[in-house]
């Protein structure tokens, strides 16, 4: 006898997966659709072709919002298009050996994807997450193991003058830890669960 492991959440959850066109974001979106077919899943990313390749597998109401989520202005534009969210999953990222690479908003590209943009998504969508009937859930996927506040340069938090790959890594993962703890500690967020996850090495097309 094979048990049906699908989860009939009521009401069906509205799920937003940022970075859902590749890697672990794509896998999470597909897994949610498999286990909860009634979920409404929106994936946000740059690669429309990759999104179209999986939209048909994401239940009855899949959506794709194209955006460069290294830019805070585009994140604000995206969040204005979302009117319901129960689960916010943040997996956007980049693997690069390049030094500090400013975006057009003068934020290092790596930090913009791994920290600043993630927290802006949370901040902008918190009102919707707080009102979730299922209880809002936020998952940021990066590295919840190796954060170390003692390795943060508090005098150059944006690393405009002291950038290195190691410092960018420590800043991003430590800031994720601290920000998630801050959001979780706020009384108005008692209905929202915040998680910072460390998946280890992830297989991607790269």
Image (spheres, rainbow, N blue to C red):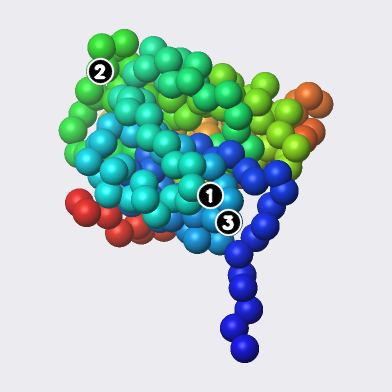
Q: Give 54 or 131, whichever is nearer the viewer.
A: 54
Residue 49, compared with residue 199, is above or below; it is above
> Percent x, y for residue 30?
43, 55
> Residue, x 36% and y 46% (percent of image)?
55
Say how many tags the image has: 3
Residue 155, above or below 5: above
Q: Nearer the viewer, residue 150 or 51?
A: 51
According to the image, label 3 marks what residue?
Answer: 36
The answer to which of marks 2 and 3 sits earlier in the sequence is 3
Q: CA distance from mark 1 to mark 2?
A: 26 Å
Mark sitting earlier along the chain (1/2): 2
The answer to whether residue 196 is visible is no
> Which mark is drawn over residue 102?
2
Q: Which residue is mark 1?
A: 197
**Looking at the picture, how far across and down is residue 164, in whole percent?**
28, 31
Comparing marks 1 and 3, which lies closer to the viewer?
A: 3
Single out the mark in the foreground, 2 or 3. 3
Q: Are marks 2 and 3 in contact (CB under 8 Å)?
A: no
Residue 5 visible in the shown view: yes
Give the Cα separation between the discs numbered 1 and 3. Answer: 21 Å
């Amino acid at each position: 006898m094979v048990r049906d492991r699908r989860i009939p959440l009521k009401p069906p959850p509205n799920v937003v997966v940022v970075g859902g066109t590749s890697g672990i974001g794509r896998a999470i979106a597909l897994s949610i659709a498999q286990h909860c077919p009634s979920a409404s899943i929106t994936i946000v990313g740059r690669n429309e072709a990759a999104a179209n390749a999986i939209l048909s597998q994401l239940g009855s109401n899949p959506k794709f919002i194209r955006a460069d989520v290294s830019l805070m202005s585009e994140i604000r534009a995206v969040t204005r298009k979302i009117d319901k969210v129960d689960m916010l999953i943040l997996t956007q990222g980049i693997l690069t050996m390049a030094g500090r690479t400013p975006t057009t908003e003068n934020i290092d590209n790596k930090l913009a994807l791994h920290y600043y943009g993630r927290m802006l998504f949370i901040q902008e969508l918190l009102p919707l997450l707080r009102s979730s009937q299922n209880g809002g859930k936020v998952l940021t996927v990066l590295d919840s193991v190796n954060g170390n506040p003692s390795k943060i340069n508090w005098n150059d938090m944006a690393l405009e003058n002291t950038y290195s790959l190691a410092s960018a890594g420590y800043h991003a993962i430590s800031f994720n830890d601290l920000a998630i703890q801050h959001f979780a500690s706020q009384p108005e967020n008692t209905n929202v669960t915040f998680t910072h996850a460390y998946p280890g090495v992830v297989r991607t097309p790269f």
